[in-house]
Amino acid sequence: MKLVPENDSMGTVLVPEDAYFGPQTQRAVENFPISGFTLPLSFIHSLALVKKYAAMINSELGLLNGQISQAVIQAADEVAEGKFDGQFVVDLFQTGSGTSTNMNMNEVISSRANEKITGRKGGKTPVHPNDHVNLCQSSNDVIPSVIHISASLLIKEKLIPSLLSLSKALSDKATEFRDINKIGRTHLQDAVPVTLGNEFSGYARQIELGISRINASRENLYELALGGTAVGTGLNAHPQFAQKVINLLAQKTGIPFTEAKNHFSAQGAQDACMEISGTLKTVAVSLVKIANDIRWLSSGPRCGIGETNIPSLQPGSSIMPGKINPVIPEAVLQVAAQVIGNDTTIMICAQSGNFELNVMLPLLAYNLLQSITLISSAAAVFAEKCITGISANAAKCASDIEKSIALATLLVPYTGYDKAAAVAKKAYETGKTVKEIAEEEKLLSEEILNRLLK
């Protein structure tokens, strides 16, 4: 790889010849070779949108000439479309404001814009990364804004559709299984009968409520810090810049973004991100409940509960022929664990606001966007590859009810608690059914027993 010298205010640095980024990005790459992780492309593409609409508004306000603004707009469009994904090389663990990533973007866009105008990429003329691409902006207001924008777009385009798909799949199964009686369980012990449809209706409702919680909490992401620049005062920004850019963002994305009512809160704190992360954690916990129940219900197939059958996706063992594992539910459980862990990291990041700036923005962005993406993918796969293919083992469900000593509960209104408990105990000790013991002891007429215990 050939390196070529480039200059900035800190002197000369060697940059890869095929790079569109410049010296500030290269210095960040050299100084932070920590993890090899970079910010998600959903973040990068949203950042490019901000630069695009900023150039449009700066032109409208008379701050950029037509040639420069058009070149910046076209270059930012290409970045947003993913044509320069490989040029965003700054490590996730960088300066806490995300300045290095912001400059990576400024340099790539200005370099590509210069190539469009002059035929040569790189350099700072005629398009300058700071003076033109970053005009009326600071990393300190842009990066918090992009966290909100990228999270909102992922929620709208991926998370909500995936959860709706999962909710529907569960609701459909609740309807399909509504007439299949089975034993209920509390404390992992036999309880009174329910239907398999009852259980699945509970799962569907959990996801419905998760969607409602997300819809309520995501509204606080719509306030954007853009316009506050360095410390929230709007220094060096045109007074109409932020509102006009945000209006464009809202129009183009269909999300009702607004300028923050208080820029000091928007830049110094990350409470909205903390709130949505907590909601994602709640959804993750719901998925744990559902995935675990489905694992248990399909356990066996002969020596477990075995009341349902889940789709067979792959061999479950490298040593035991014919073994089938609940692959998708187990994958969902791992996703939930990651999201729950991410929430703790986001909490630590969110409490790291010092005076006018939060200084853990890149890590917060990474974990929040990962959580949204993971739940989106897991919910979609859970619905498609598992829930829709579940079938009921009606014979096993009926057999379990017949054998259960919990049926003695149905006798209580007629015999009292103590006599019913004695029937249950004798059924357990003899291996007979509750009905058989009740008939032997002539506790109730055959007609009543048949009606109660059918």
Image (cartoon, rainbow, N blue to C red):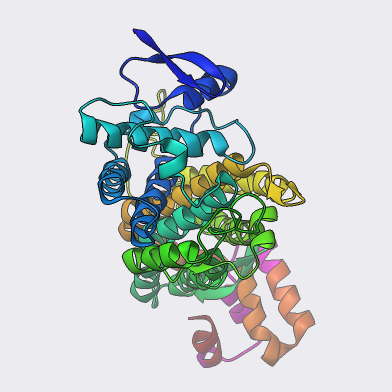
Closer-to-camera residue (205/262):
262
Q: Compared with residue 139, is residue 200 higher up or lower down, i.e. above or below?
A: below
Q: Is residue 349 left or right of residue 386?
A: right
**Horizontal and vertical percent for residue 324?**
39, 39
- Looking at the rendered image, the quarter that the N terminus falls into is top left
- Residue occupying the point 52% across, 65% down: 239
Residue 116, above or below 398:
above
Q: Main secondary structure of the magenta part?
A: helix
Q: Which residues are magenta?
A: 426-447
Q: Does the stretch in magenta take in 370?
A: no
The residue lying furthest to the top in this view is 2
**Residue 386: x and y, percent?**
36, 53
> Depth check: 78 or 138 in front?
138
Against 50, residue 338 (above or below) is: above
Q: Is residue 321 visible?
A: no
User: Quick check: is 427 in the magenta stretch?
Assistant: yes
